[in-house]
Image (cartoon, coloured by chain):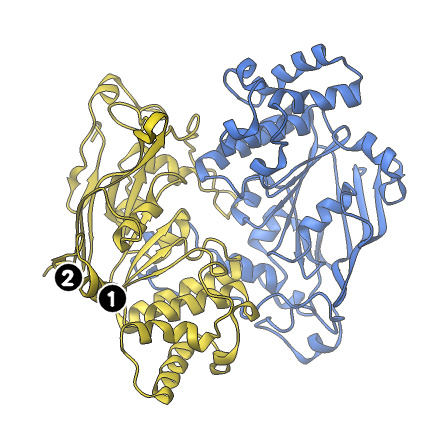
Chain colours: A yellow, B blue
Amino acid sequence: MTPLLEVSDLVKYFPIIGGAFRRSREAVRAVDGLSFHVDRGETLSIVGESGCGKSTVGKAILRLTEPTSGDLRFDGKSYVAARGAEMKAIRRRLQVVFQDPYGSMNPRMRVRETIAEPLYNFGLTGSRLETTEKVRDLLVRVGLPADALTRFPHEFSGGQRQRLSIARALAPGADLIICDEAVSALDVSVKAQIVNLLSDLQQEIGVALLFISHDLAIVEHLTHRVAVMYLGKIVELADRRDLFRDARHPYTRALLSAVPAPRIKVRKERVILKGDVPSPVHPPSGCRFHTRCPLAFERCRTEEPLLRSVDDKHLSACHLD
Amino acid sequence: MQPLLSVQNLRAHFATRDGVVRAVDGLSFDVCAGQTLAIVGESGCGKSVTSLSILRLLDEPPAKLAGDILFDGRNLIDLDEAAMRQLRGNQISMVFQEPMTSLNPLLTVGRQLAEPFVLHQGLGYAQARARAVEMLSLVGIALPEQRMREYPHQLSGGMCQRVMIAIAIACNPKILVADEPTTALDVTIQAQILDLMRGLQARIGSAIILITHDLGVVAEMAQRVVVMYAGRKVEDASVAEIFENPRHPYTRGLLGAIPKLGSSADESTLHRRLTEIRGAVPSLIAPQEGCSFAGRCPMVRDVCRRVAPALREVAAGHDSACHLAKELGPMQ
């Protein structure tokens, strides 16, 4: 069966324009050759530190920013060059929830209009009454009171607003929702509510999620598979259990060991990485992680390790594997 | 042990157009030398206002402070601005959440780092600069001489936070107040900063008041924990007691709401629901009748809605403000 979303060799460079004649002399290599897929009804998470390019991946898949090169396929059909009606048909099924629910809603539109807008946009509305009924169903589905219809976004708390964003993404019948740090700005107790909601929705209606996050504990809780990014590349990709129980790449291991555990008497072996993430304008030669890797040796400085299979469905990009 | 800082019945109220916001309402706690006390709670529970009150950094008015903040034989609530300036950055200092915005963008790192030595130790700028370079290498910044001449925008978030910490500990303060010091940072950088703070505490023996919402950071850093909810302390205990034997439903809710790394050990945990705390933090304007957590509490009884529970000792060194504290067993 063809995967729902297939990303092949995705590249996104942002040129740095400057100097005489506004030439582009260098580029921020935000995403540098990414390949992965998302199956129907599954959750794939992309994790990594700030600046690793994980949000750019999400935007490039949505074509909110145009990929520099590479191919994107939805349901087997390439849409990287699609235009007009063709792209619109993909967008109906490919929706997004952003981190900041305050910034992603029009403050002057009432909830009914906000949620109904995708319905109008994709011609999915019937009579006015039917539309209202549809919106009401969506509100109930995401756990909001039906009387929210006539209210404005500012009347809701952060968690409730994130519920509205999810309802809006579901409205046109999305098959895949890209959640870009969708729970990161929320308080602990509210975060749990939204994580539960996403998990329930996936079980009820089989929506697939591309969950972009830096919170490893949340990712481990809700994902089927995980891709770990570092400086625009995937360094490891594996099933949930394999990645969290048997991480192969030194970066993944360091990342996991850096998460403080909310329990006592568990003193874990900690790998503290030196320094900061290098600049994506001039990524290090060879393996991009070699400047911070505790295990780096000569070959890492010169030769770039390829992402290859180390085990069934477990990919890692390290010379030591 | 004699507490170094003793906060008694602290109140910080703000007069607003809509009424008086009781951001902190009768908070008491003690901190001892060399100890790390964590204050935890969700946004709006009053933890940042508490830290700002201790350093008297709130604008008064609109803020109105009451209660006692006893430090070194003095009550900080009664001190005037000049006396506070003698203390701030000297005996008590603070690390803020946003490292990128807490430094002055118009001054070099060196200039900002030399300031406490000039102000509090009466050094000339040349000597102060030399001390500043020492401080930068102490907090693990490579090429300190070069960094001294740079501006904050040339530094990464983690480096800015190191500079903030260097400024805060420049005069070997007795108390370091750290308000979400690692929240804006990535986990690998967070690990570096926490490691640095622990090392420095061992070296200069300061007490740390750590304000955070991250229970992982609490488990790693603190010896004592104060849990705040809606401007009040709901639980106060040693870190072991908080994690193993919490005696307030809010603390238990917080602990249940965070997924823990390692959940994939059991395949059935996928799609297992996290414990939710329903609803949201109540308004701090309306006067609270009964327990402020009653509206969200899974164990709520009639008495909770009528009578505000007083903070009582439920075990040695363990206080809880809950009518049902005695009925709560250890966490599984």
User: Would residue B88 be visible to someone looking at this image?
Assistant: yes
Q: Nearer the viewer, residue A69 or B302?
A: A69
User: Would residue B275 be visible to someone looking at this image?
Assistant: no
Q: What is the tally of numbered marks visible in this picture? A: 2
Name the residue tied to disc 1: A93
Pointer 1: residues within 10 angstroms few (<14), some, or many (20+)?
some
Name the residue tied to disc 2: A75
Give left or right: position of B34 versus B7. left
Mark 1 → mark 2, Cα distance in angstroms = 10 Å
Whether discs 1 and 2 lie on one chain: the answer is yes
Local secondary structure at mark 2: loop
Q: Earlier in the sequence, mark 1 or mark 2?
A: 2
Please, which residue is most extreme toward the front here? A21
Marked residue chain, label 1: A
Q: Name the residue at 20% across, 23% down.
A: A303
Local secondary structure at mark 1: helix
- Marks 2 and 1: in contact by CB < 8 Å? yes
Identity of the amino acid at label 1? Arg
The image quadrant where one finds the N terminus of chain B is: top right
Above or below: residue A289 compared with residue A148: above
